[in-house]
Image (cartoon, grey):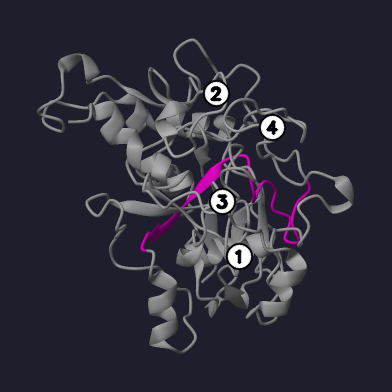
Amino acid sequence: MHSPALNRFRPALLTALLPAVALGMLPARPVSGAESSKTSKFLPTAENKTPPPGPAPKGMVWIPGGEFSMGSDATDDSLCHRPGLTQDAQPIHRVYVDGFWMDQTEVTNAEFEKFVAATGYKTIAEIAPTREQFPTAPLENLVAGSPVFTPTPGPVDLNNFLLWWRYEKGADWRHPEGPQSNLEGRANYPVVHVAYPDAVAYAKWAGKRLPTEAEWEFAARGGLTGQRYAWGDELKPGGKWMANIYEGTFPVKDTGADGFAGLAAVGKFPANGYGLHDIAGNAWEWVSDWYRPDTYARRKLAGGLPRNPQGPDASYDPDEPSEKKRIHRGGSFLCSDQYCTRYMVGTRGKGEESTASNHVGFRCVIPVK
């Protein structure tokens, strides 16, 4: 049996990193932006022309909504050079979403602290698992905590994510690296170590909700059609870093070539076409849809133009069929061209909904009726 620590964090790591299945180390050639456009099934984004219904709520921007092509045509996301990892983001298909307001950045520690001060809320990471939840676990393992990324002393087998993750007693949103850490100087950093119910609770308190996957992707594309990234087809246009991702040898050392080694404060990189910051990299973001690898295929098969799709009715991941998983979007500071290029705008992550970690946060939306 796994300890409850492993039971609680293993699914979330599979979310952002990859299920630990033996797919083989097959060579793959990344698809360039030019090649992508030649074979693309993307059709132009048709934005709604209705103006915003009023002034923007504080810290939010207007997303006009409209009809767009959703998904990814990348055949390989460079994750350990394994082909086919973006198949759950295919086929590309047309979707319509109404306009809405969206947080300009990920929810910060300062914002989450106001919620906790007002409500007394405790996150899942702050609550010790119980004997009822894990009847066979040793008592010493029933401790509150959360997974924390830990660099390795040298190159390792990238098939074994347990080599660079540890379950840290006392790690939570107030203590991102464990009980010895705190939020001093981090008020404007994304809040992390939040599980899906924690994000939902904050959103409800704030009079908002989490975005659907379709809303998130429409917003992330910023009005562009079928581009590889939220800012275009080039990772570093003009040699300029556009997102906080992992440089150097993963998982040994993040060189911080983009200006940051590890998590960064929000808003340190240029906004996309709709004024959204950090829509790629920095911290993964929870969205409301259940995860299924065949969601897009089923949607395409059903035909027609889905309007404001909410995702499937239940979760199913063939790698872990008993786990209830929600979608993650946007990638994090741990994504790199060596292990996880899920900062590509159309690609998808997945996470067990009660599991948190130090590279997953969220942002909220307000729909307009």
What amino acid is found at the position of numbered circle 4 in the picture?
Gly
Q: Nearer the viewer, mark 1 or mark 3?
A: 3
| Relative side of 314 to 232, left or right | left
Reading the chain from its start, which is encountered first: label 4 or label 1? 1
Dot label at residue 151: 2
> Could you say whether the residue bearing mark 1 is in a helix, strand or loop?
loop
- The residue shown at (51%, 40%) is 361
Residue 301 vertical placement versus 256 (above, below): below
Residue 307 vertical placement versus 79 (above, below): below
Disc 1 marks which residue? Answer: 74
> Could you say whether the residue bearing mark 4 is in a helix, strand or loop?
loop
Residue range (magenta): 270-292
In 3D space, how far apart are the residues under numbered discs 2 and 3 (Cα atoms)? 21 Å
| Relative side of 132 to 261, left or right | left
- The residue shown at (53%, 51%) is 364
Q: Nearer the viewer, mark 2 or mark 3?
A: 3
| Relative side of 72 to 90, left or right | right
